[in-house]
């Protein structure tokens, strides 16, 4: 249920940007969400709709761009795609993978008026 707090934080960031950049309506929000970020996308969409009802993001579309999990093996230096934490390296079998992408959540773009 941390999607509720994510939606609230997202709205707060958007409202701060609106104040700084003087826009009055959000039409679309593009989010990049890493596959390893443990975010239930439909829950986030639901809670974003709920928290944005009385805001400048009311009726804004939430577009989610999935970012694949990626890691580098610290043993053999192979870059590989991963879908969960603590996977073995597909090349050498080592469990010394260091995540380099896929755990982030960030606002990529806003369509505003």
Image (cartoon, helix red, strand yellow):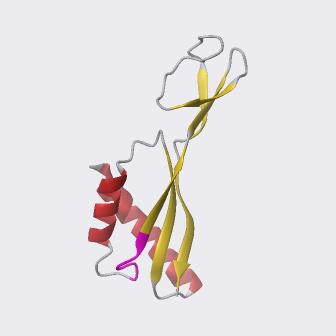
Name the residue rendered at 48%, 74% in the picture.
28
Residue placed farthest to the right in the image? 77
In the rendered image, residue 94 lying in the magenta stretch gets the answer: no
State whether residue 51 is above or below residue 83. below
Please provide percent x and percent y for residue 63: 46, 64
Q: Is residue 16 above or below residue 91?
A: below
Please give the name of the residue rendered at 28% of the width and 62% of the height, measured from the top-left corner.
46
Q: Front-most of 104 and 80? A: 80
Residue positioned 35% across, 78% down in the render: 59
Q: Position of residue 18 (x, y in %)?
A: 51, 81
Q: Position of residue 42 (x, y in %)?
A: 32, 55
Residue range of the region highlighted in magenta in the rendering:
56-61
Q: What is the tally of numbered marks visible in this picture?
A: 0
Vertical placement of 93 versus 19: above or below? above
Residue 82, how many percent across, how many down? 54, 30
Q: Main secondary structure of the magenta part?
A: loop
Residue that appears at 34% across and 48% down: 40
4 left or right, relative to 28: left
In the image, residue 81 above or below residue 75:
below
* Residue 3 sits in quarter: bottom left
Nearer to us in this view, 106 or 60: 60
Front residue of this view, candidates 75 and 90: 90
């Amino acid at each position: 249920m941390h999607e509720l707090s994510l939606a609230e934080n997202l709205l707060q960031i958007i409202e701060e940007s609106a104040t700084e950049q003087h826009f009055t309506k959000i039409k679309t929000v593009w989010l990049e969400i890493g596959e390893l970020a443990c975010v239930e996308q439909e829950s986030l969409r639901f809670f974003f709709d709920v928290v944005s009802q009385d805001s400048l993001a009311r009726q804004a579309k939430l577009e989610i761009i999935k970012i694949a999990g990626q890691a580098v093996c610290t043993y053999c230096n192979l870059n590989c795609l991963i879908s969960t934490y603590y996977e073995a390296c597909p090349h050498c079998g080592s469990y010394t993978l260091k995540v380099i992408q896929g755990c982030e959540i960030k606002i990529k773009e806003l369509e505003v008026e």
